[in-house]
Image (cartoon, rainbow, N blue to C red):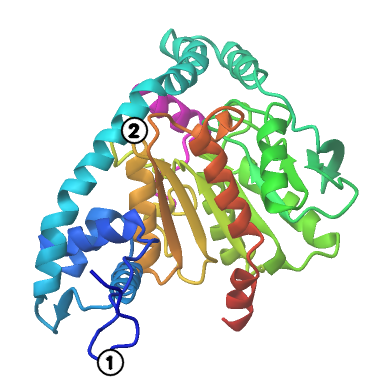
Amino acid sequence: MRCVTDDPNVLAFPQAPEAIELRHLRAFVAVAEELNFGRAAERLYITQPALSRQIRALEALLGCELLRRSTHRVELTLAGEALLGRVLPVLREVDAAVSAVQSVGGELVGRVHRLWEPLVQAAASDADVQEQRTAYEKMLANFSLPPEVTVRAVTANGVSSLVVGQQPDDPPRLLHLHGGGYVIGSAFGYRPLAGALALAADTGVLVPDYRLAPEHPFPAAIEDAVSAYSWMLDRGIAPDEVTLSGDSSGGGLVMSVLLTLKQRGLPQPGGAVLMCPWVDLALNLRHDENIRRSAAAYLGGHSADDPVASPLGADLTDLPPLLIQAAVGDDRLQDGNALADHARRHGVDARLELYPVDAHVFHLFWPFLPEAAEALEAAGRFASDDRVREDRQAG
């Protein structure tokens, strides 16, 4: 055997690519099995343009066409057929390996459920509101404020609030509305989550102690949140430099604030992050009895059909970009899916991110849950993304 280096009849054999992403392979498999980009996009919970970009990236990396597209049909090329037959066993092995690792790491999810359990029990036993509030604060007290951030108290247009950040004297650019079914939760209890979010977004976070039901039903929480947002603008921050965020009912409250701003002709923020949002106060989607009680307490007799209260029935046209984060094992996943679909139908740039977690508002557990830390990093990038601001200005 001899090495041929200069023979013009010898062709260089290209190296195998080293950076094929699993998501691109999964995108290819979905299209290959469905032979339809629309159905494949729905199956993967992404948009068709995003799916097309992933397929094009894979084809560019491999240097060949895998799919032939026409107006009415999608076909596999010979290269596509060869890849499909070989990639399916690979993905099965990867999924098996992930399942094995998750079973070992199941203790993390178990820890999440153990932390939630006292509050779940309090709600199930018909404990009064004060007992539920105490149980929630005890659960939140399991986490510490990140050492890099500090906290200062402010009164934001009459609303008692906290500013959490590395430079708390600087005007905050992120407003977080805490969850708790509109009846429990506090700015104090949410300091750790706000601190993690402040680090991820590299800005201060304003957390208002908006008024809670049943003492202060709809629309008290909305009015407080709008006042806090106006306070941020009064500090000299441009609207499109502000991001609103909220978890669970706080996510629903964010949507109510955006719709209220729209009704009043006030400037919209640059974007909004919705963490496991609860947006179905009309209870058209499946919810348990605890959710019904929270909805009734918050509405206080007000119609659930009011689109400001139930944004799934609202005209969302002209709202800013939305980042919706949801857990695949959360019983409120339907809210996130429905909101993303509804927003897109009204021309809103709505991005839905799904995380393989079996817990509601998993973001709270960022100190030990990798998916939570990853979600907060994504939220921080979204909040600090200059392109979001430029898109709003161009619009």
Q: Can you say which quadrant of the picture contains the C terminus?
A: bottom right
- The quarter holding residue 29 reads bottom left
Q: Which region is colored magenta?
A: 289-306
Q: Is residue 368 above or below residue 383?
A: above
- Residue 375's spot in the image, x, y percent? 52, 45
Chain-order first, disc 2 or disc 1: 1
Between 111 and 297, which is closer to the camera in this rendering?
Answer: 111
- Confirm whether the magenta stretch covers residue 295: yes
Residue 33, visible in the rendered structure: yes
Give the residue number, with chain letter if any, for mark 2: 331
Q: Residue at x 58, y 59 (%)?
A: 382
- The quarter holding residue 189 reads top right
- Residue 268's spot in the image, x, y percent? 63, 66
Q: What's the residue type where badge 1 is placed?
A: Pro
- The quarter holding residue 48 reads bottom left
- Classed neighbour count for the residue bearing mark 2: other residues with Cα under 10 Å, few (<14), some (14–19), many (≥20): some
Res. 199 mark:
none
Q: Is residue 320 above or below residue 282?
A: below
Q: Residue at x 41, y 28 (%)?
A: 291
- Confirm whether the magenta stretch covers residue 296: yes
Residue most toward the right? 169
Residue most toward the bottom? 8
Mark 1 secondary-structure assignment: loop
For marks 2 and 1, give the CA distance.
Answer: 64 Å
Q: Is residue 5 above or below residue 336?
A: below
Between 78 and 341, which is closer to the camera in this rendering?
Answer: 78
Res. 8 mark:
1
